[in-house]
Image (cartoon, rainbow, N blue to C red):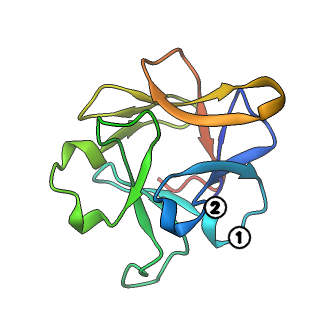
Amino acid sequence: ARLRNNKAKDVCLDQGPQENHTAILYPCHGWGPQLARYTREGFLHLGALGTTTLLPDTRCLVDTGKSRFPQLLDCDKVKSSLHKRWSFIQNGAILNKGTGRCLEVENRGMAGIDLILRSCTGQRWTIKNFIK
């Protein structure tokens, strides 16, 4: 399921280069790196989805509180459970429960669009193929 922001129409949340551990925005294509899933526990998984077990390239979106960029980490390795939990409703904000920051996009003009964490400004996200 693709996750997109109301301020950035043609890009989707994407895993970006694995070694950077940072989520990015990338033109929507709907393949594995852009498969997002919001779980009952409030986790946001990004990556290819396994049927029974989580595949190694499925990671959790995390606000560590240290960076203005959202990190993509192995869920089990994140000590603080709140930093990997998000409150999200369809067409609403994605708010981190540990830091109170929102996942938002920031337009940098010609340089493109950054995916950042900051105080919420009312941006809205939708997951295509939202599963209740």
Tell which of 50 and 98 is nearer to you. Answer: 98
Q: Is residue 17 above or below residue 71?
A: below
In the depicted structure, whether residue 119 falls above or below residue 32: above
10 Å neighbourhood of mark 1: few (<14), some, or many (≥20)? few
Residue tagged 1: 31
Report the amino acid beneath label 1: Trp
**Where does the image place residue 65, in percent across and percent down from the top left?**
29, 35
Residue assigned mark 2: 34
Residue 110 location (% of width, % of height): 84, 29
- Residue situated in front as seen by the camera: 77 or 93: 77
Could you tell whether 111 is left or right of 63 in the image?
A: right
Q: Taking 9 as reference, is 62 left or right? A: left
Residues at marks 2 and 1, CA–CA distance in whole angstroms: 6 Å
Q: Which mark is residue 51?
A: none
Query: Residue at image x 55%, y 75%?
Result: 48
In the image, 14: left or right of 62?
A: right
| Residue drawn at (80%, 24%) of the image | 109
Query: Where on the picture, by quarter, is residue 73?
Result: bottom left
Residue 126 location, quadrant: top right
Secondary structure under tag 1 reads: loop
Front one among 113 and 58: 113
Q: Judge the density around disc 2: few (<14), some (14-19), many (≥20) Cα neighbours within 10 Å.
A: many
The residue under label 2 is which amino acid type? Gln
Q: Are marks 2 and 1 in contact (CB under 8 Å)?
A: yes
Quarter in which the N terminus is drawn: bottom right
Q: Residue at x 75, y 45 (%)?
A: 11
Q: Position of residue 21 (x, y in %)?
A: 46, 59
Residue pictured at 60% horizontal, 49% vertical? 24
Q: Residue furthest left?
A: 79
